[in-house]
Structure formats: C-alpha cells, structure tokens
Amino acid sequence: MTETTKDTTVVVIGGGVAGLALGNFLLRNGVGCIVLEKHSRAYVEQRQRAGALDAGGVRVLNEWGVGEAVDGYSHGDSDAPMPLLIDGEKRQWRSGDDDEDDVDGAFCPQQILVRNLIRVFLRDGGDLRFEAQDVALHDIDTGRPLVSYRDANGVTQDVSCDVVAGGDGYRGVSRTAIPDDVLTCSTHEFGYAWLTVMAGVPADPLAVLAVHSRGFAAQITRGPEASRLYLQCPLTDTVEEWPDERIWSELEARFGESVEPKGPITSKQIVPLRGVVFSPMSYGRLYLLGDAAHLISPMSAQGMSLALHDADVLARAIIQQVERNDSSLLDSYSDTCLDHTWERQASAVWMTRTMHDSGDAGYEGEFCRQIARKNLETMLEPATTPHPAAEAGASQSQG
Ligand SMILES: Cc1cc2nc3c(=O)[nH]c(=O)nc-3n(C[C@H](O)[C@H](O)[C@H](O)COP(=O)(O)OP(=O)(O)OC[C@H]3O[C@@H](n4cnc5c(N)ncnc54)[C@H](O)[C@@H]3O)c2cc1C
C-alpha cells in the first residue's frame, strides 16, 4: 500500500548530528522539513561514537539558538590539565592556541548531543520519523524530487519536496543517488588502525594522549562513568587478538604508568584511519552533508564539527532560497563545503601523522619519526629539564 503523505520543503535523510542539526536550524526559521531516520529513537539515543566537539561546532549550535544541546559539557575553562605522555614523560599542550575563540569546545558524548537535538526538535514541533526503512530518492534532477520510504507499520510513504538533504552517514543511500560518472571519491589511507574500546570507567583527566614507541594511545571521557580507549594497531589486527587484559596492559605500557580504575569493556572495534572526500557534494536538488560526503581521521576529532558546518551552510542556503527566491548559496553549497572540508582534512592529516609517526617507527621509519617529533614539539610547552647550572646551584645549597 502506498500513501502520499504530504509535500514539504525539505526532506532530511538521517537523524544523526548533521541531519538533526539541519532540521533544528530550518524549523527555527519556519522552513517545513521532515527528518527520516532508519533506526528507532532508543537505538540512536544510545549509539556511542564521538565525544569531543570543537569550538567551531559549539559556535554553530549557539548561533542557531541550539546551544542547549551541549549545555554543561564545556571544557575550555577546565583547570584540569590534559597531558600528553611521550614515552612516559608528562608534557603539556602549549596554552594560548585556543584563546582566540570566544567559545569553548565541549566533551559531549555523541549520543547525548543526538538525544538533545532530538528532544529540542520534537519539543519545538519538528516532524521526525524513526524506523523509516527502504528510503529511496527519485527525480532529484527535477524541480520536484520525491522521497519514498516504508514506515514503522510497513506502509510505503511518498513525500515530495523542493530539496533533499542527505545526512545519512558514510553507509547511507543518499550518495548512491548521484550518478557514478558525476561523483568522485578521493581517499587517503594512513596505513594503520585504531582499536577503539568503550570502557565503563571515568577518564581523569578528561583526555590523556600518549605517543610511544609501541604506538599511539589515548583515554578520552565519554561522560562521568565511561571513557573511550584508543590503541594504534596494524590494519590486519582483529578484536579477537585483543582480550580485555591485553588492552589494559598495553594502555599502561604506552602511558608509562598504571591506569586506574580499570573496569568493564563493553565494545571493541578496529577502525582504519583514513580521510575520504566525495565531490561534488550536491547533484540536482540533492545536497550531501556530514559523513555522507566525507570522513575525517578521528585523530582530529572534527567529524561532528564538519557535519555541523555543512548543516549551517545548507540551512542558510535553503532559507535564502525560500525567503528571497535566491539560489546563489545553494548553487555554491558544494564548493563552499568542499573548500572547508579540504582545509580540515589538511590539518587532520598533519595531526594524525604527527601523533602516530612520532611514536612507532615501524610504519614510516626513523626519519619520519624524528620529523614528527619536531613537529610535535611546536605544539607543546617546553620540557621542564632543569638547566645544569640550576642543578649545580641546588646541589651546592643542599650540600
Ligand atoms: C572511533 C571514532 C571516534 C570519533 N571521534 C570523534 C570525535 O571525538 N569528535 C568528532 O567530532 N567526531 C568524531 N568522530 C566522527 C563522528 O562520529 C562523525 O563524523 C559523525 O557521526 C558524523 O555525523 P553524521 O550525522 O554525518 O553521520 P552519522 O552520525 O553516521 O548519522 C547518520 C544517520 O543516518 C541514519 N541513516 C543511515 N542510513 C539511513 C537510511 N538509509 N535512511 C535513513 N537514515 C539512515 C543513521 O542511522 C544515522 O542516525 C569519530 C568517529 C569514530 C569512528
């Protein structure tokens, strides 16, 4: 059975950070939209992924009046130091680099951000349809595209619209609607992976990173009772090769100190480090945003921020089209977002290489390790090795 549900201005495919942010931005400006999410509300509200939103991402939410989605998760003013351990020696990140920002980033677990964006959207009257199966895009190269899906009762629904926003992540369906001879994919593989692990223990401090000859490691908060552990590993590793005891002992070896408390490990995954950019980010009336259009190395912790950037640019463009019948921002959407994406990819590649190549020389060799160490030093406060004269003076006065 097929029902034509209704017409709307924008159909947003995917209720992740990108899709929900766009939905909220449009709703606040009176633009009709329907968000279609494949999974149930319960599922997306507990799906653990990212945990750090940079200042740019927080600023976008604030500017659209949705800052409440990360309220209580600011970390910029935290007095707690966030150390970097280099072969077990504790170092501090150089202060001042973020001071130009008028807002702070936030250690906000992704599922909390998603939960809050859903709550705000529904509270303000948004139309969000969970468990939308078999979403398909039709006529995106015409002036009136149509999106079909099967609802939770198994009834096929058709929605016609002016714009389709594809925010359905890396494995979504939106991007596949762009013809193969139009879409290009640029990929960079770093040649190693992260074993990423959810552990039911708090992280204190909120983020500890370690550069070590055994490989990169990190423990980063995911709320008061959880943290995510990261261990660089070969691409060929499997989670079966990483029993819980090995994870904790390897983390301690790379931190060069004991890690307490240890606790239950609830999930393990091997994630190859890569950057991916699809171009163009629009075709006809379809506009891709977030992971549907690009993946960035998780070392940069900028995936959510990129998703919010795309949502910000697309929302402005749609509003300009609706309010002034001016398509210029929609026309330049792909170029604008690709320019920003490549800028972020450049810094993510630099950061990923610096943090990994400066540890285990087994991947890129000793020359690259030395170069990466020098690059790393530019981001750190000087090591506090006492001057020999000061040491001599101290021993004389003690003697
Ligand atoms: C290990 C790891 C750590 C990370 N850490 C960070 C970090 O600290 N900071 C950061 O900023 N980023 C981080 N990221 C990246 C971040 O998680 C992503 O960039 C972010 O989730 C992108 O949001 P999105 O909304 O574009 O896509 P998604 O979050 O993937 O959302 C897409 C949504 O679309 C839905 N969907 C999929 N297919 C369909 C369909 N056919 N129909 C309808 N709905 C569909 C999905 O269910 C989902 O809800 C990390 C990623 C990984 C893997």
Image (spheres, grey):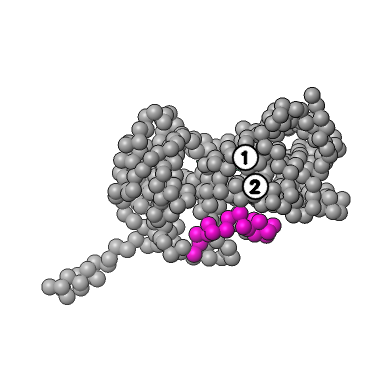
* Residue sitting nearer the eye, 2 or 146: 2
Q: Position of residue 364 (x, y in %)?
A: 41, 39
Q: Residue 329, can we see it?
A: no
Disc 2 residue crowd, few under 14, some 14–19, many 20+, Cα 10 Å:
many
Above or below, comparing residue 331 to residue 272 in the picture: below
| Residue 372, numbered circle | none
Mark 2, residue position: 118
Tell which circle, 2 or 1, labels the residue nearer the N-terminal end.
Answer: 1
Magenta part of the chain: 60-77
Circle 1 SS class: helix
**Residue at 56% across, 48% down:** 112
Mark 1, residue position: 41
What amino acid is at disc 1?
Answer: Arg
Image quadrant where residue 200 sits? top left
Q: Position of residue 140 (x, y in %)?
A: 80, 34
Q: Position of residue 9 (x, y in %)?
A: 81, 44
